[in-house]
Every structure is written in structure tokens, then in C-alpha cells.
Amino acid sequence: MQPTGVPLPPILRLARALHGADDLERVLDKVREFLLETTRYRWVYVHLLHPSGTKMEIAGWALPQADKIRASLQLVDVSRDPFLQRVLYTKEVLVIGDLRLVPDADQAQVEAAGIRTAIAAPMFDQDAHLGPLVVCSFTDQELLTPTPEELDVISQVAALVGTVIARLRAREAQAHAESRLARAAKAEALGRMAAEYIRKSLNLKDL
């Protein structure tokens, strides 16, 4: 137990803030607040791999055209984009100093989003690769190369967010399973009621 009056280490404060969180966007809002306190970075989002392996889900960051950017990126066939594949499947922290200098990055998308420096830190659910947590600078800060201390913080945050995402997915899967069982039980009950009604109707006709 933490002694009274002794402040928690920053990453433990974030872990406590995320305890019980039930919405990914709220999780990333808390992460963004944490990064604003502990690093020079203002923006964070996640790329989540779709089970199909060809699509991705994007959550996080607050920019004027964030919804439009997310919608356009979610239509990208990841399996045909070498740059996004590198980012999505990285198993180590990937630092891209200036996205405008990456030859196989979609420069129209880079310009539309205004992203400059990007740090992609992989997230895992045990051995399952979830995708990266991305911390970045936009045109408001231009290029912003991370320090070793900032990279360490971002790695810790990615590990923590991966754990939270795994918990949210497990809860969602359980809710779906319970819903399916409830529907099956209801259908079974209705079937029994229908069978009983038919049996009674037949008995009445026999009289």
C-alpha cells in the first residue's frame, strides 16, 4: 500500500485513472492529459488491427477534421500499404522524425492531417498484437524528436493502454455472449409456449 502523503509515480497515477474505464475515447483523453503533464507531446491516438488484417480502427486525438481523417483512413486497405503495415505491425517503438520524408507514406494524407513527427509504440494482449499507440506532433509544433525519457514514458503508456483495451474487449465479448444466451433462452421459452398452446388446442379439438 502506498504510504499516506507519498505521491504515486506518474504511470501508476495513470493506471489508477484508467481503472474501470469503459470507453476507449475516454481512456485516450486521460492518456492525453497524462502526456501533456509528462512530455512535450499534445496528441495521441491508436491504430487497432481489424481481425480481417486488411482494415483498422482509429481512436483518439482532438483535431478539427479528426472524424474525416479517421473515416478516410479506415477505408484504406492496409494489406496494400507498406508504410501502414510497418506502423501497425511494429514490435518495437518506431520513431518517424518527419513523415514528409517517408517515401512510401501517403503524402496527401500526411499533408491533410498535418502530422510531422510520429512515435508508434506497439500494444499487446499477452502475445496478441493489438496495433500501435501513436504519439505525434502536428503543424502546431512541427518536428519534435523524442528524448529517451519521453520514449520510456510512451512505451509504458502503450503497455498500459494495451491492457485496458484487452479488458474492454473481453468485457464486450462477455456482453455479446450473455446477450446471445438471453436471446436463445427467450426463443426456447417461446417455443415451449407455442408447443403447449398447440397441444392444448389439439386436446380441445379431440373433445
Image (cartoon, rainbow, N blue to C red):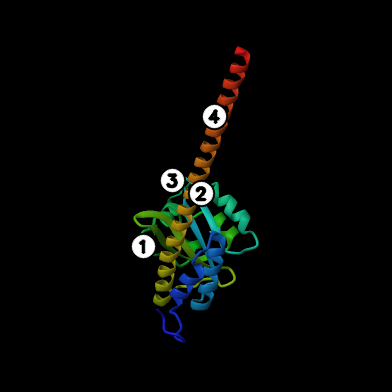
Q: Which residue is mark 1?
A: 92
Type of amino acid at the residue the image marks with label 4:
Arg
Residue to which mark 2 is pinned: 175
Q: In the rendered structure, are the residues bearing label 4 and label 1 in contact, judged by CB atoms less than 8 Å apart?
A: no
Mark 3 sits on what residue? 53
Question: Residue 40's spot in the image, x, y percent?
Answer: 51, 76
Q: Looking at the image, is 9 positioned above or below residue 90? A: below
Residue at image point 43% right, 79% down: 9
Whole-angstrom CA distance, mark 4 to mark 3, is: 43 Å
Residue at point 47% right, 87% down?
5
- Compare residues 142 and 125 and report the one nearer the observer: 125
Nearer to us of marks 2 and 1 is: 2
The tally of labels here is 4
Would you say the residues marked 2 and 4 are in contact, meaning their CB atoms lie under 8 Å apart?
no
Indicate which disc, 2 or 4, sits on the residue closer to the N terminus. 2
SS label for mark 4: helix
- Callout in the foreground (4, 1): 4
Task: Please identify the quadrant where the C terminus is shown.
Answer: top right
Residue type, mark 2 in image: Ala
Label 4 and label 1: CA atoms lie apart by 56 Å
Mark 1 and mark 3 residues within 8 Å of each other at the beta carbon? no
Residue to which mark 4 is pinned: 192
Nearest to N terminus: mark 2 or mark 1: 1
- Residue at position x 50%, y 51% in the image: 172
User: Which label sits on residue 75?
Assistant: none
Marks 2 and 3 close (CB-CB < 8 Å) = no
Coordinates of residue 46 in the picture (x, y in percent): 50, 59
Left or right for 12, reference 22: left
Q: Quadrant of the N terminus?
A: bottom left
**Label 2 element class:** helix
**What is the CA distance from the residue labelled 2 to the residue labelled 1?**
33 Å
* 78 up-or-down from 201: above or below: below
